[in-house]
Amino acid sequence: MTVAADSPRAPAHAFVSGPGPAAVPASVPSLATRVRSIGGSPVRDILAVTARPEVINFAGGLPAPELFDREGVAAAFRYALEETPAQALQYATTEGEPILRERLAARTTARGLPTTADDLLVTTGSQQALSLLATALLDPGDTVLVEAPCYLAALQVFGLAGARIVAVPGDADGPDPEALADLVVRERPKLLYTVPTFQNPTGRTLPAGRRAAVAAVAARHGLWIVEDDPYGELRYEGERVPWIAAHPDARDRTVLLGSFSKVMAPGIRLGWLRAPTELRRACAVAKQAADLHTPTVNQLAAARYLTAFDLDAHVARVAAVYRERRDAMLAGLADALPAGSVWTRPEGGMFLWARLPESYDTTVLLPRVVAQDVAYVPGAPFYAGEPDRSTLRLCFVTQTPEEIGEGLRRLGRGLRG
């Protein structure tokens, strides 16, 4: 029986139907071209496959959780919630909490790049900073220059923006400045994206002389640089290399990205970008459309941590442990990898990069290796152009030296078949 909507037995808005054909689920609307053309993250896919506790996972890019300063972070959050609850639980400005920007500006200035709070925009992780820049700068078809290989999530961001991504030829030290200059003249790119210190995925660091040459190319040809620095504080040895953004030739045309993910905790989801006024304001407009602002309580807790605790001392303790783990991996690679393999020796960061003999395809080999309860990330997804399929990325910071040794023995068995 059907009761009409105007029946006195039913509310004016009601329509009750009797038995009928089963409802057909609605089909998903046609997805945007930019989403259809970009795949998911192979790293995330591998992590899902290797979630079993018995797997020794060299695939992730996760900091070691046992090294988080849980007591310090908890105290900082308690302070924010107990001492400033009305502010901590309220909306905030898009640009970020002034006290946090002041603390970040002081840290940036102390590391050689004079910075004020007004130079900074707080973001929900530095990954959001990269997305905001893509929104503010890139139209479909614009060209972006990247390293070869390149940080995978940056390739995703630029791909979603519809950019044409071109890799700059280089060597073990990074992009070649002469090749960069040729590409700038030929391609007229919107920007160059680079992770010059302890790069993801290779772990390499762009030397000071080459940074100066890249800055000179930028000044000569009007190139904008996006310098991503999530790992720079995790140095184990050697001398710190100044940011490209601090070079006189690049100061007016470099956006510097930073993050607490690798030095405090990724779950706090705090990053920032330093950019000239007009570009920073454009990114703030993009952020208003994305999430209004980064969570206030997280910002105030981070500011409190920087005030009440010694982040530099914490990072030094973490780096000392990471160095032991890097050394353990370096010590075992010769026995684990096939003869003729080569690999990087990073001075810091979280990753090293290996190239096996040309006959090896690390994507094809991965299932065989995972069957040995160990995992890596194949190198192919990190390339914007033709990939080197014999490469792979290993993260060494999440496991103990003993676990690393066992993981490398398993890796060797998997590669040998």
Image (tube, grey):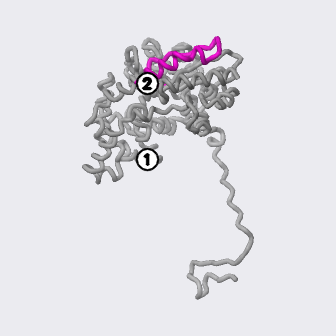
Residue 115, above or below 218: below
Tell me if I can see residue 72 in this picture. yes
The residue to which callout 1 is attached is 288
Task: Name the outermost residue toward the bottom.
Answer: 8
Residue 72 % position (x, y): 31, 38
Q: Secondary structure at mark 1?
A: helix
Q: Which residues are magenta?
A: 321-350
Query: Which is more toward the observer, 11 or 412?
Result: 412
Of label 1 and label 2, which has the lower sequence position? 1
Disc 2 residue crowd, few under 14, some 14–19, many 20+, Cα 10 Å: many
Residue at 56% over, 82% down: 11
What element does badge 2 sit on?
helix
Q: Is residue 273 visible to us here?
A: no
Q: Is residue 272 above or below residue 78?
A: above
How far from the left and from the top, in percent, is residue 321? Answer: 41, 24
Which three-letter amino acid code belongs to the residue tagged 1? Gln
The amino acid type, in three-letter code, at marker 2 is Tyr
Task: Name the residue tied to disc 2.
Answer: 322
Q: Is residue 339 magenta?
A: yes
Which residue corresponds to the image point at 56% horizontal and 24% vertical from the top-left?
406
Q: CA distance from mark 1 to mark 2?
A: 37 Å
* Total number of numbered discs in the rendering: 2
Residue in view at x 43 percent, y 41 percent: 267
Residue at the spot x=44%, y=44% of the render? Answer: 287
